[in-house]
Image (tube, grey):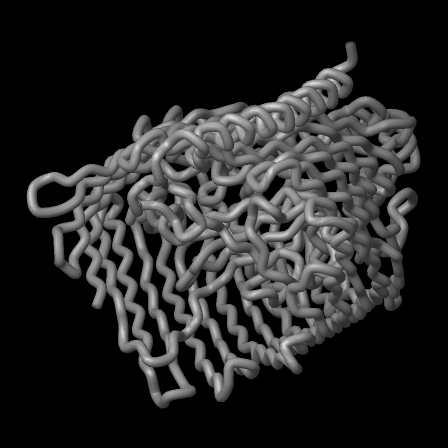
Amino acid sequence: MRPSSVLLTATASLLALAATSARAADAASATAAETAPAPAADPMVDADGSPLGTIVVNGEKREVNLQTAPIAISTVSADALRQRNATELADLNGFVPGLTVTKSEGNERVIAIRGVGYETAQNPNSQPGVAFHIDGVYIAHVVALNQDLLDVDHVEVLRGPQGTVFGQTSTGGAVNVITRKPVLGEYTGEAQLSYGNYNYVRAMGTLNVPIAETLALRGTVQYLRHDGYGYAVGVPGYAKYPLDDANNIGGHVSLLWQPSPDTSVTLSAQSFDASHNAALQKCLLCSTDPAAGSTTYIADPNADPRVVSQDFGGKYVTKTRMAYLSIAQTIDDKVVLKSVTAYQYLNKNQSGDNDRFIYANYHDNIVRWQDMSSTWTQEVSASSTPNKSLEWVVGGFYLRQHALQNIMEYTTGGFSTDPATGQAVSFQTDSPYQHTSWAGYGQAIFHATDTLDLIAGARYSWDKISAQPVQYFATVPERIATSDALTGKVSVQYQVTPTNMLYVTGSKGYKPSGVTFAGNSIFVKSTYAKETVWAAEVGSKNEFFDKTLRLNVAGYYYWYKDFQFTAEDPVPFAGGTANIPRAQTYGVEFETTWAPTKQLRFDGTLALAEGKFHGDYYTIDKQTAQDIRATTYAALGYPAGWYYDPRVIAAVIAASTNTNGKKIPKLPGVQGSFAATYTAPVGPGELMLRGEVIYRGKFNSRIFNVPQFDTVPSYTIGNLMIQYQPDASPFTFSVTGTNITDKAGVSNKFADPYGSGTTSVEYIPPRQVFATVGYKF
């Protein structure tokens, strides 16, 4: 039997079992209710009778119980983030089934959900497959994903195409960070101070101030720094040049005005600054003689994964700013009008050792890599209030972005010369680009019966991306790409019992087309096509045994059209974004929580997945092409101008790779987590012990599936936490250990699609142990 059949059969069987168990459990509960005395009130039980609590989500423009939302959606609370010391998006690995967050070229973050991610991270005008939002505001530039999480209430992760009501449309899903809001009439605050190894310091302070009866202000400031997790030997002037360090400061402030229960106006602003050394990228496969295009490779000679041999000390400086105004008005308790107006700004500059090695007579260094972005977004919507017949929402979305990418790369014997310094240049770009997007959407929920809901929604999106690239100090003709799509979803939801639900959903997501900057390519076009994903999903959400056990299951099958990826061209340095016509992905996911007693709780996730490209499509692997160019160069007797010799180009074309049957990148076959939490009174207070194990299976970093360049190995890590809360005290004391076995897990491999052509590895953080003192009033 095919793996897809096995997964789908298993999913169907599990859903059927859940429904059968639900009916049996419901019947058993009814019988027990007839014979058992009424239980005493339990202060540990949530208001709805659940020891696990009720989780409210707002993923589709309406607040609903997570257990009744007909979508694969997961939430991560602020407490869960704190217990694992998750301070940025990369720390979410292991929280959510099907979610993979990897590093890319050091400081970028690539989010993939069910294998739908961002395989064009080196093209700044391309769009990610997973849309990232803060309080519903779409974050327009992927570099901004590298900022710290500030004053978070919870994080919602929606798995599956979001092509209807959620901000910017996406093919893979959405991550929405929900911040804490001001509270009227309450003067409260909290502070936390943490210290640990690597001179880790995190200081955070929050204050909620009632200004008037209808006005409140909430503000948070956070400072985070630590020494480098590793270092470089060989940087002039340094015995050990720190890498993978941090020096960040951020703040979030919100002003709430609520003149009546029907009117709410919130003005928010967020700021984040980081200034530190470059990320650690360890050479895995570097050419023995890059100047001659050698086809033999060497690895970094240092056995310690946290030590690299590099002779250029890189820097990373970024600044993000955003402000947004949210207005909500309820009319006659029937209609809710909402408006979210936002402005965001980003300025990032980094440098680094691009050849990842020390060569006697060669260097390749990025001395400037600047990304700037200024974006306005506006979203308006009208929706019905909750009712028992028909709920609906209609709205519109607008985005206007002005951005710039400026890169200067110096090398030995470059292809051009920097007129400002006289340095040899291997790559230069100074390319402004613009993105305009607008969309209109609508969705309705028809409550056919007390237990059956029918859901349908549609969205029309239009995007235009234009660029005025300058490459190697020469202006390339302006590039313009426009695309549009009609996307949406249909869903059927059936409430088997009050605590058991089944749903079936079909949806479509869209990622717009864009432009490439190269000017002399053969295969890679000046524009690339839009990407679409059709998805089918079946799911079951259940609570058993007096709501002490929660089990949610989802199975899915995706059909890709025009998968966007980074392609090499037969002409050197002319690569860019292209499309693979077809791919399919499928899998099954589990989330469970069990609280057998008031003191003990278990949490677990498991995701099984498979995805491959289908149909013949030939493309060129940069790393393989680099070897062929060097081999052909030698066979031809080292002619002048060999890189652009027609015979070398023909040899590269002849070695094109067929993607048929190759695996989707960023899609682990297996990933999961298990955590146990025990809470008990100890002395004059409460003690909490928590331990967890996270497993991330191996995957391919690129579409080419070349083992030495692309296979990212699996890893297993463990985290521990102990916390003590004295009775009637505002203080909390805790000690946390992350990656307690000090596993040098590989976050990702990066096979440079341009420039040096090196392959490097990027690691997860090492073991960290730190103590935290918290104070609330």
Report whether 499 appears left or right of 125.
left
Residue 428 position by quadrant:
bottom right
As drawn, 347 above or below 341 = above
As drawn, 392 above or below 658 = below
In this orientation, which residue lies closer to the viewer: 628 or 537? 537
In this orientation, which residue lies closer to the viewer: 746 or 601? 601
Q: Residue furthest front?
A: 35
Q: Residue at x 13, y 58 (%)?
A: 729
Q: Quadrant of the N terminus?
A: top right
Q: Residue at x 81, y 67 (%)?
A: 439
Q: Residue at x 55, y 56 (%)?
A: 145
Residue 4 rendering spot, x and y as whole percentages: 76, 20
Q: Is residue 229 visible?
A: yes
In this orientation, which residue lies closer to the viewer: 38 or 200? 38
Residue 436 rendering spot, x and y as whole percentages: 79, 71
Residue 602 position by quadrant:
top left
Residue 108 rendering spot, x and y as whole percentages: 56, 51
Residue 751 rendering spot, x and y as whole percentages: 64, 36
